[in-house]
Image (cartoon, rainbow, N blue to C red):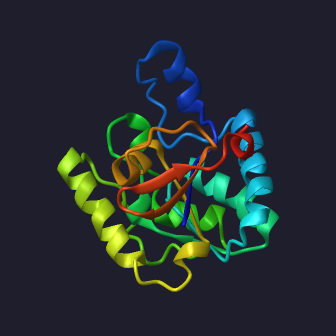
Amino acid sequence: MILVRHGQSEFNVHYAKTRIDPGIVDPALTEEGRLQAQAAAEILRAHEIERVLASPFTRTLQTAEIIAGALKLPVEIEPLVHEHAAFICDIGTPAGDLAKRWPDWRFDHLPDRWWPESEQEEQLQARCQRFWDLVETHAARPRTLVVTHWGFIRALTGLRVGNGHLVRFTAPGAAELLHPRETA
């Protein structure tokens, strides 16, 4: 399985400069974020990806749209891989509104308000375990791409990765960044 952190979002730009939550609800990708998603798609062409799972946040959906479009694959929405609820950017968009924006994707398995109000670290760890339990026996797991977030990747793998970075994940405790030249 390969995890990819979404491309740079509007939140990431402001937070990196100030370390203060700028109060942007469910931010979109920046132009740099779109370029990061395109670069990830180019790297992923060599990895025989068969399945794309994405968090329901706008920044991950936009990243998944770019990557899945390049790979000519459908996108499955997986709420278990959403971001750790810690900032205003972790307030999502209602599922009905997402379905209007991405009419070819299924959101009907989500409640309209699908994101948590808050989440403790233990809850995040439990969610990561539920995700691993869900995919552990799935036959397509080695060729699955998960478009997700910094907090989820950190909790699942222990790695802290930048926007657009790719992580090969085979089991809890067994994760590695793809070769640095592949993520440059």
Question: Does residue 89 appear to the left or right of 75 in the view shown?
Answer: left
Q: Residue at x 50, y 66 (%)?
A: 96
Question: Does residue 38 appear to the left or right of 183 in the view shown?
Answer: right
Q: Residue at x 32, y 60 (%)?
A: 128
Q: How many marks?
A: 0
Image x and y of residue 108, in percent: 47, 77
| Residue 7 placement: quadrant | top right
> 90 or 39: which is nearer to us?
39
Residue closest to the far top: 18
* Relative height, residue 148 to residue 107 (above, below): above
Image x and y of residue 74, in percent: 68, 75
* Relative height, residue 10 to residue 148 (above, below): above
Q: Quadrant of the N terminus?
A: bottom right
Image x and y of residue 68, in percent: 72, 65
Q: Residue at x 48, y 47 (%)?
A: 149
Q: Quadrant of the C terminus?
A: top right
Image x and y of residue 43, in percent: 76, 54
> 146 or 174: which is nearer to us?
174
* Relative height, residue 113 to residue 76 (above, below): above
